Image (cartoon, helix red, strand yellow):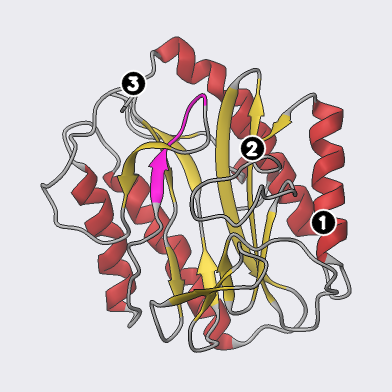
């Protein structure tokens, strides 16, 4: 069921968005060559506890997951792009890292992701990250009252295809509010003018993600981590966005922290 939020409820969602933004900004700043993925998860867990927030991931067990996730943040590295289950791995120079984090504050959820390189970057990795970030910006620009879901999806796919990337539509954006995943689904490819109309009060997590040379995924033996079928690297950018008559509000915006 698609739910619309009142202006008062959107205001109540702001603390969750701010908290998720602060966690991702902090973790991005602290994550360097040698950082262990399990240490990232512990740090996120500590920040959740100190803030009195709740994890959306630790007990999460959808149909595509082999078991409850058991951690509080997704850490996807290099050819892993989605749902990376934190494990005992120390980051190496040049690793492409995606941190995907969702949490609930006072019963409201926000969801966001950021990709970056630790150490010495490859030009092709920076280009891939730039594409996912520009696709997210285009999606946000299209998230206005009077458009439709297909307009957001089309905005994402135009950026990706112009840069030579193919698109997987199995996983994409989604409604967010009291729970992490709700209706409607927002595919990363679509036709303009099609799909559910964007209305005042609709809150969406928009999340373009791309792999460098494929759009096919395989699942790790951990039952969660999704990797490219050919070993190519991936990038994932996500924000929680409220659609209002005054324009889109990026609830997980990190710019107030001096980062993007």
Q: Dot 3: within a 10 Å radius of its alpha carbon, few (fewer than 14), some, or many (20 or more) residues?
A: some
Mark nearer the viewer, 3 or 2? 2
Residue at the limit of the structure toward the left, as seen here:
193
The numbered mark at residue 226 is none
Q: Going by the image, does 37 lie left or right of 129?
A: right
Q: What residue is pinned by disc 1?
A: 40
Q: Residue 96 versus residue 81: which sits nearer the camera? A: 81
Find the distance from the CA under tag 3 to the CA under tag 1: 34 Å
SS label for mark 2: loop
Find the distance from the CA under tag 1 to the CA under tag 2: 16 Å
Name the spot of residue 88 as percent of width and height, x first: 85, 69
Name the spot of residue 167 as percent of width and height, x first: 33, 71
Q: What residue is pinned by disc 3?
A: 4
Q: Earlier in the sequence, mark 1 or mark 2?
A: 1
Q: What residue is pinned by disc 2?
A: 56
Magenta-drawn segment = 173-178
Q: Residue 59 versus residue 202: which sits nearer the camera? A: 59
Q: Residue 244 versus residue 178: which sits nearer the camera? A: 178
Q: Is residue 176 magenta?
A: yes
Q: Dot 1: within a 10 Å radius of its alpha carbon, few (fewer than 14), some, or many (20 or more) residues?
A: many
Quarter containing the N terminus: top left
Residue plotted at (56% across, 55% down) = 65
Vertical arrangement, residue 100 with respect to residue 8, above or below: below
Assess whether mark 1 and mark 3 are in contact (beta carbons under 8 angstroms): no
Mark nearer the viewer, 1 or 2? 2
Quadrant of the image occupied by residue 254? top right
């Amino acid at each position: 069921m698609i739910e619309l939020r009142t202006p008062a409820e959107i205001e109540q969602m702001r603390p969750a968005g701010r908290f998720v933004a602060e966690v991702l900004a902090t973790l991005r700043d602290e994550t360097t060559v040698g950082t262990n993925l399990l240490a990232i998860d512990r740090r996120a867990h500590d920040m959740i506890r100190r803030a009195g927030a709740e994890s959306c991931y630790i007990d999460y067990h959808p149909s595509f997951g082999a078991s409850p996730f058991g951690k509080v943040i997704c850490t996807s590295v290099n050819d892993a792009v989605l749902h990376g289950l934190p494990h005992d791995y120390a980051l190496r120079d040049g690793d492409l890292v995606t941190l995907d984090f969702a949490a609930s504050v006072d019963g409201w959820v926000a969801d966001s992701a950021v990709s970056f390189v630790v150490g010495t970057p490859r030009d092709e990795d920076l280009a891939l990250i730039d594409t996912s970030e520009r696709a997210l910006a285009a999606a946000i620009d299209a998230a206005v009252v009077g458009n439709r879901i297909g307009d957001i999806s089309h905005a994402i796919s135009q950026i990706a295809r112009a840069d030579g990337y193919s698109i997987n539509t199995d996983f994409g954006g989604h409604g967010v509010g009291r729970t992490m995943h709700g209706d409607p689904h927002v595919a990363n490819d679509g036709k303009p003018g099609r799909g559910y109309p964007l209305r005042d009060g609709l809150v969406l997590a928009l999340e373009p993600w791309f792999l460098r040379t494929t759009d096919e995924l395989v699942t790790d033996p951990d039952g969660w981590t999704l990797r490219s079928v050919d070993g190519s690297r991936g990038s994932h950018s996500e924000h929680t966005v409220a659609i209002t008559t005054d324009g889109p509000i990026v609830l997980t915006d990190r710019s107030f922290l001096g980062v993007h």
